[in-house]
Image (cartoon, helix red, strand yellow):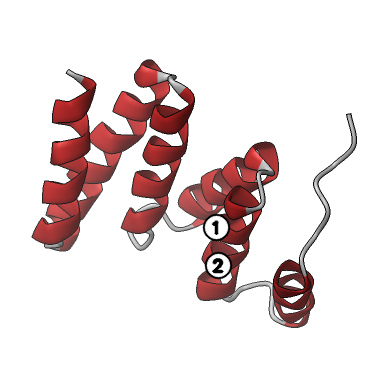
Amino acid sequence: MTAPRKSARRQALEESLAADPSDTFLRYGLALQCLREGDLDEGRERLEALIADHPDDQVAAYQQLGQSYMDEGDSERARDYFTRGIARAQVAGDLKAAGEMQGFLELLG
């Protein structure tokens, strides 16, 4: 199986990130672009690394990982990321994100 073709946007994000590897916004954006392009493994790895490096600052990464697993039918992994994300969102005071992830949990049953 061949790797998905990289878009110009993804290449630009990779170049920007190479210039500033500590930029969490670029890291998140590149991970999402990978997911959009169907490169689930790369996108998930990038989101997981971002969470590992910044567990309290990247609440949206938990939600995106949960959604990617939910879309694929992996309810157990989706539930894990949503649950962890809700806890982080509550600590951060991000009640909107916590509520959104709670809604996804309810959809999972």
Q: Which residue is nearer to you in this view: 46 or 56?
A: 46
- Residue 52, numbered circle: none
Identified by mark 1, the residue type is Leu
**How many angstroms separate mark 1 from mark 2 (CA)?**
5 Å
Q: Is residue 15 left or right of residue 66?
A: right
Q: Is residue 102 left or right of residue 17?
A: left
**Residue 46 image point, x, y percent:** 61, 50
As helix, strand or loop, the secondary structure at mark 1 comes to helix
**Residue 104 image point, x, y percent:** 22, 36
Q: Is residue 79 left or right of residue 22?
A: left
**Residue 92 image point, x, y percent:** 18, 61
Q: Which residue is label 1 attached to?
A: 32
x 36%, y 17%: residue: 76
As helix, strand or loop, the secondary structure at mark 2 comes to helix
User: Is disc 1 in contact with disc 2, using a CB cutoff of under 8 Å?
Assistant: yes
**Residue 28 image point, x, y percent:** 52, 63
* 61 versus 25 height, above or below: above
* 7 versus 85 height, above or below: below
**Quarter of the figure with residue 80:** top left
Q: Which residue is label 2 attached to?
A: 29
Q: Which residue is nearer to you in this view: 51 or 6?
A: 6
x 44%, y 19%: residue: 74
Q: Residues within 10 Å of mark 2 (few under 14, many from 20)?
A: some
x 72%, y 81%: residue: 16
